[in-house]
């Protein structure tokens, strides 16, 4: 649902901390440090089910989790919008950050053990890393080779304020 015309303020991050603004890859890491990829997929599937199935209601705990996860998703979209800006930047420190993350992408790959420690994982027993479960099966071969292209395509479709409007 589109809102009024967007102001320049709408293009700036609202939820990111100064460290995340300075290095948006830290916010991406924080997103997956909160919960692992599998749990994010499970939650999004649950939201889809709740939105489509008539009469389905979330319980009190699920509603609380929904708000926290919503904030994390908005934080991720803001961080990715800054990564998108880094791609087009000619400012040398921005270019160095982008190139270092492209060349050292292991910083963003999960460890050998599921170490997500978010609020909802307090009782979670870490299990061995299983590569198949974390495989990006939604990406084609070209996107797997260049994940920054996925971010570029994401923001070529809509801009940050439009994604915020869609999330509301």
Image (tube, rainbow, N blue to C red):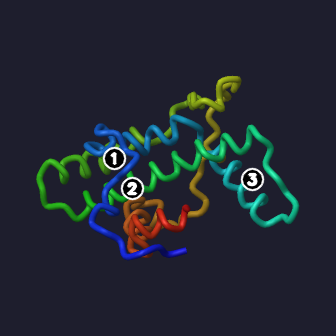
Q: Are marks 3 and 2 in contact (CB under 8 Å)?
A: no
The residue nearer to you, when weighing 147 against 160, is 160
The residue nearer to you, when weighing 119 against 45, is 119
For the residue carrying disc 3, how many other residues have a C-alpha within 10 Å: few (<14), some (14-19), or many (20+)?
some
* Outermost front residue: 4
Report helix, strand or loop for mark 3. helix
Residue 165 position within the rendered picture, expressed as x and y whole percent measured from the top left: 49, 67
**Residue at (19%, 51%) from the top-left corner?**
94
**Sequence-first tag of 1 and 2:** 1
Q: Are marks 1 and 2 in contact (CB under 8 Å)?
A: yes
Is residue 82 toward the left or the right of residue 64 in the image? left
Residue that label 1 marks: 24
Report helix, strand or loop for mark 1. helix
What whole-number distance in Å separates the C-alpha atoms at marks 1 and 2?
7 Å
The residue nearer to you, when weighing 136 against 12, is 12
**Residue at (44%, 65%) from the top-left corner?**
150
Residue 153 position within the rendered picture, expressed as x and y whole percent measured from the top left: 41, 71
Q: Quadrant of the N terminus?
A: bottom right
Residue that label 3 marks: 46
């Amino acid at each position: 649902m589109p809102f009024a015309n967007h102001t320049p303020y709408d293009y700036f991050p609202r939820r990111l901390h100064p460290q995340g603004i300075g290095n948006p890859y830290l916010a991406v890491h924080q997103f997956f440090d909160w919960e692992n990829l599998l749990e994010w997929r499970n939650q999004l599937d649950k939201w889809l089910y709740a939105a489509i199935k008539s009469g389905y209601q979330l319980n009190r705990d699920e509603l609380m989790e929904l708000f926290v996860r919503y904030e994390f998703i908005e934080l991720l979209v803001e961080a990715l919008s800054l990564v998108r800006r880094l791609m087009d930047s000619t400012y040398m420190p921005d270019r160095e950050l982008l190139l270092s993350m492209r060349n050292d992408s292991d910083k963003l790959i999960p460890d050998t053990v599921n170490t997500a420690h978010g609020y909802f994982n307090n009782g979670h027993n870490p299990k061995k890393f299983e590569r198949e479960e974390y495989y990006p099966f939604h990406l084609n071969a070209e996107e797997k080779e260049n994940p920054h292209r996925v971010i570029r395509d994401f923001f070529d479709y809509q801009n940050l304020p439009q994604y915020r409007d869609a999330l509301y």
